[in-house]
Amino acid sequence: MDLKVLLTTFGMIFLAEIGDKTQLAVLSFAAQNKPRLAVFLGSAAALVLTSLLAVSFGEGLSRFIPANYVRTGAGVLFVLLGAWMIFFPGAK
């Protein structure tokens, strides 16, 4: 296992998740006097499963599309989604 990749991935995901809507939803569940262990295990399992899906999809995608195109496409998608949220904040 590549320790540098592990630590870099951990750091980036950790920083990206701080204060996002998922974390706020977990905070809300825990604040509602729900069993905290169940809230923790449910949220941890969800993050693990979504990460597994992302890794699997990314690995499969890399067989057909070069990594730099995937990174560029992801960046463009983030910019487009951000612009959509700015210009159409109430759109459903």
Image: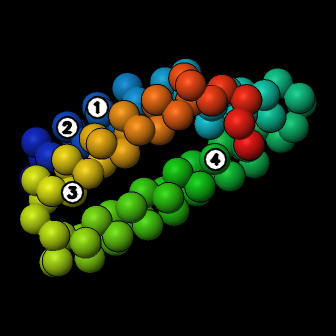
Q: CA distance from mark 1 to mark 2?
A: 5 Å
For the residues bearing labels 1 and 2, Cβ distance under 8 angstroms: yes
Q: CA distance from mark 2 to mark 3?
A: 19 Å
The crowd level at tag 2 (other Cα within 10 Å; few <14, some 14-19, many 20+) is few
Hey, which quadrant is residue 88 in on the image?
top right
For the residue marked with disc 1, what is the amino acid?
Answer: Gly
Q: CA distance from mark 2 to mark 4?
A: 22 Å
Q: Which residue is mark 2?
A: 8
Q: CA distance from mark 1 to mark 3?
A: 21 Å
For marks 1 and 4, the one nearer the N-term is 1
The crowd level at tag 3 (other Cα within 10 Å; few <14, some 14-19, many 20+) is some
Which label was assigned to residue 70? 3
Q: Secondary structure at mark 4?
A: helix
Instruction: Report the residue at 28% width, 41% height from top.
Output: 75
For the residue marked with disc 4, what is the amino acid?
Answer: Ser
Q: Which residue is mark 4?
A: 43
For the residue marked with disc 3, what is the amino acid?
Answer: Val
For the residues bearing labels 3 and 4, Cβ distance under 8 angstroms: no
Q: x%, y% of residue 29? A: 80, 34
Q: Nearer the viewer, residue 44 or 57?
A: 57
Q: Secondary structure at mark 3?
A: helix
For the residues bearing labels 2 and 3, Cβ distance under 8 angstroms: no
Position of residue 91 relative to residue 53, above or below, is: above
Count of marks, rendered view:
4
For marks 3 and 4, the one nearer the N-term is 4
Q: Secondary structure at mark 2?
A: helix
The crowd level at tag 1 (other Cα within 10 Å; few <14, some 14-19, many 20+) is few
